[in-house]
Image: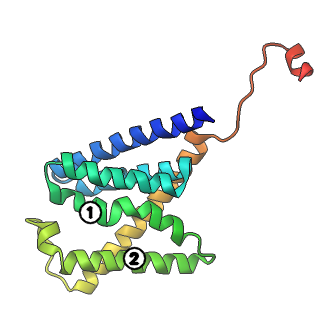
Amino acid sequence: MNSKRTYKLALGGICLALTLVFLFGASVIPGAELTLYAVSSLFVAVMMIESGIKGGAALYAAAVLLGLLIIPNKLGILPYVCLFGLYGMVKFYIEKLRHPAAQIAVKILFFGAILAAALTVFRELLLGDIQVPDMPLGILLGGGILMMLLYDLIYTLLIRIYKERVKREKKVEFHLSQKDSREE
């Protein structure tokens, strides 16, 4: 029992460190921000798989607090705080809905709300010097929602890969000889 707890604690530390590395990279490497935020969000899902929603929430909270302390660009952590870090937990609850159409509709509403706030209320704060095409808000929201649905698909595939190849719930038993296996 103690080894499981130690495993979860060690995994949490590794996931936290990797999350912070990717968040740091997102704040200092121009042009790769969205990719690095997306990768940083996967560690919350790993913690949720290994230790439940509480483990994922604890990792998210720790990443936000430590990120605010050590990331040089404090505004650079906002996309993680507002969307990417939360998404694993939000996805978990959305996918409890029975109908796939309802899941997609709720995801579109979630993405739309976050993107609308980012493009209207927090545009100068979040985007800074980044030039957004001068297009109607509806077109920008539509394109952003399509990109976020693609992100959701990739996120789902990476979670599946983790479950099948890394976690491997099947236990492999080794026996020294045929005699050992018959005695059990």
Side of 163 relative to 60 (left or right): right
- Decide: is 176 above or below 82: above
Q: Amino acid at mark 1?
A: Pro
As measured in the structure, the alpha-carbon distance from the residue carrying label 1 to the one carrying label 2 is 14 Å
Q: Is residue 120 visible?
A: yes
- Decide: is 171 above or below 87: above
Which quarter of the image is occupied by the C terminus? Answer: top right
Q: Position of residue 46 (x, y in %)?
A: 49, 48
* Residue on which the image places disc 1: 79
- Splitting the image into 4 quarters, where does residue 78 fall? bottom left
Q: Is residue 158 visible?
A: no
> Secondary structure under badge 2?
helix
Name the residue at 21% across, 53% down: 68
Q: Amino acid at mark 2?
A: Phe
> Secondary structure under badge 1?
helix
Side of 147 relative to 171 (left or right): left
